[in-house]
Image: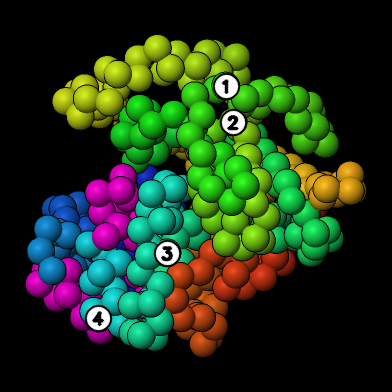
Amino acid sequence: MSEFMIYGSYGYTGVLVVEEALRRGLRPVLGGRDEAKLKEQASRTGLEYRPFSLDSAEAVDNGLAGMQVVIHCAGPFCHTARAMAEGCVRQRVHYLDITGEIEVFQLLESMDAAAREAGIMLLPGAGFDVVPTDCLAAHLKQRLPEATQLTLAFYATFKPSHGTLLTMVESSHRGCVIRKNGKLTAIPSASKERRVNFGPSTRTAIAIPWGDVFTAYHSTGIPNIEVYMAGSRSWHLLIKSTRYFHGLLARESVRRFLQNRVKEGGQSAEARARGYCLFWGEASDEQGNRVEARLRTPDAYALTALTTVLITKKVFNGSAPAGFNTPSMAYGPDLIWEVQEVTRLE
């Protein structure tokens, strides 16, 4: 089957998505702007490839011709998502990506009407960001329909890939964002902290501008949302330090300087196999009722490959609601439980 494309297929995450697609019996078309890398990957996998950049609408349209679905893996998505999504609307191609960037979710939600008219689905956040947390949020909403407060947290044993590091640098000057009374609200970096019981362990976590601050509001309608990430003490100190360099990091020239010095990241197959992620969520209402849930998943990048290919197969089976969707809006809160490697820890 070759009616879908993985764009950015030679990047760290793209390679994992290609491998999972092949494992599931799919034959994706490889896409990206670097023809040499595509040719080398195609020779290893026996797959068709199409080199094209996102700099012109004509190039995108030609690249997407004949496709039914694209999994967009080339970030930072704040620079690449618009061109790809607009091309998908023009060519009537279902769009998936693996972003966690709030501004990209906002952009694609603003294209909802155009996507509906084209009869295509726009589903950003089809990987580690934000499938597990979005499903957890929708699950908690089912258990407490009158919830007014949603808090999510996660801990992941992963080494960031090159693309993830580039995105982190790109957004380093923006501080944190929470959802308060239905509105996205900026707060200083690492200004909110809490202890989270993930089940196997209790860890200190700090608030971060995770995609669920945007998506979970659309999935659940809960007006107050915060997302926390647990990490090492040194990681917490690094995030807190960005407060004092906010003005410097706001300069594009400084961010480009830092991005040009980002080295290749990611980790080996053995490290991914040992890795895991823990998620926790809590919903509460104005009467003081409270529900919580926990889950454990494989390594973040391994999970992204599993969920993006799972969703792609659903699209091929005819399940692709038109317009902007979050994972749970399109496929319900039990989507994450379809990944066999995921364990419920309630």
Which of the 4 image quarters holds residue 82? Answer: bottom left
| Circles 4 and 1 in contact, beta carbons < 8 Å | no
Mark positioned earlier in the residue sequence (2 or 4): 4
Left/right placement of residue 298 relative to residue 264 reads right
Mark positioned earlier in the residue sequence (2 or 3): 3
Depth check: give the residue in front, 330 or 165.
Answer: 330
State which mark lies toward you, 1 or 2. 1
| Circles 1 and 2 in contact, beta carbons < 8 Å | yes
| Circles 3 and 4 in contact, beta carbons < 8 Å | no
Q: Residue at x 60, y 43 (%)?
A: 180
Left/right placement of residue 343 relative to residue 227 reads right
State which mark lies toward you, 3 or 4. 3
Depth check: give the residue in front, 276 or 23.
Answer: 276
Q: Position of residue 299 (x, y in %)?
A: 58, 43
State which mark lies toward you, 2 or 4. 2
What is the distance, in whole Å, between disc 2 and disc 4 at their CAs? 39 Å
Location of mark 4 (residue):
91
| Circles 2 and 4 in contact, beta carbons < 8 Å | no
Q: Quadrant of the N terminus?
A: bottom left
Mark positioned earlier in the residue sequence (3 or 4): 4
Q: Is residue 330 above or below residue 170?
A: below
Q: Position of residue 28 (x, y in %)?
A: 35, 71
Location of mark 2 (residue):
207
Location of mark 3 (residue):
109
Report helix, strand or loop for mark 3.
helix
Mark positioned earlier in the residue sequence (3 or 1): 3
